[in-house]
């Protein structure tokens, strides 16, 4: 059932259709299935919420977000459906960074300028060593997916810092992992 959600959502992202609606529909179908399934309900009752369960769930959510976004964006690039302006700017900036160390681009305003004149993007320098080892467009897509999935780490730490319950911490992680703006 979760595989169906993954495939439907991936197809929606690749086709550039209403991702939020498709993904939301798939999630509702899975939740409805879980609600009526006696086995799943019984398993949920038996699971005692503990820090170990929450940590494991966060790791699984991180893997899901990385796999989903990485696969969707790489496939979108491979079948020529990636957004030209945004991804072109991103790819050109990394090529310039690889050669000069500076975030130059001509895509942003029609002439050679530093990307810092428009956006402050120091995180690009964290991604640069990976791109220098594997200078492919897909590398940029996968590192971006990794950074989005890594957002679960500070989220988890914030929940612990504010002493939120295990159930609330888990719910916050699920909301982040299924947030349409991140997955779309």
Image (cartoon, grey):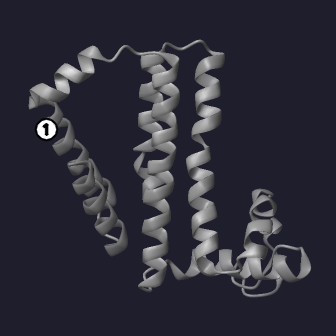
Label 1 SS: helix
Q: Residue at x 80, y 67 (%)?
A: 129
Relative to residue 120, is residue 59 drawn left or right? left
Residue at x 81% of width, y 81% of height? 96
Would residue 3 be found to the left or right of residue 35 on screen? right
Residue 123 pos. (x, y %)? 76, 57
Q: Nearer the viewer, residue 111 or 180?
A: 180
Q: Is residue 36 above or below residue 52?
A: below
> 75 and 50: which one is in front?
50
User: Is the residue marked by circle 1 packed among few (<14), some (14-19), or many (20+) residues within 10 Å?
Assistant: few
24 over 82 or under it: above or below: above
Quarter of image, res 143: bottom right
Quarter of the image for residue 86 reads bottom right
Question: Is 31 located above or below residue 7 in the figure?
Answer: above
| Count of labels in the image | 1
Residue in front for this viewpoint, 83 or 133: 133
Query: Which residue is at 71% across, 80% downward?
Result: 135
Quadrant containing the C terminus is bottom left
Determine if residue 21 is in view.
no
Residue 178 versus residue 110 in the image, above or below? above
Frontmost residue, 163 versus 67 = 67
In the rendering, at what x and y percent does residue 140 appear? 64, 70
Can residue 177 be seen from the camera position used here?
yes
Question: What residue would you read off at disc 1?
Answer: 33
Residue at 71% of width from left, 82% of height from top?
92
Expressed as whole percent of the image width and height from the top left, the position of residue 66 reads: 51, 55
């Amino acid at each position: 059932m979760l595989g169906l959600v993954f495939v439907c959502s991936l197809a929606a992202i690749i086709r550039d259709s209403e991702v939020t609606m498709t993904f939301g529909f798939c999630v509702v179908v899975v939740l409805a299935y879980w609600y009526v399934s006696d086995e799943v309900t019984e398993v949920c009752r038996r699971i005692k919420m503990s820090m170990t369960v929450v940590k494991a769930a966060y790791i699984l959510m991180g893997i899901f977000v990385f796999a989903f976004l990485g696969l969707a964006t790489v496939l979108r690039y491979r079948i020529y459906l990636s957004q030209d302006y945004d991804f072109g700017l991103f790819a050109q900036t990394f090529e310039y960074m690889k050669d000069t160390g500076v975030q130059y681009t001509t895509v942003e305003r029609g002439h050679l300028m530093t990307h810092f004149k428009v956006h402050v993007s120091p995180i690009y320098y964290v991604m640069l060593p990976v791109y220098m080892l594997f200078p492919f467009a897909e590398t940029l897509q996968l590192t971006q997916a990794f950074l989005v999935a890594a957002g679960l780490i500070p989220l988890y730490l914030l929940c612990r810092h504010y002493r939120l319950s295990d159930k609330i911490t888990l719910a916050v992680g699920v909301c982040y992992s299924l947030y349409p703006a991140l997955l779309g």
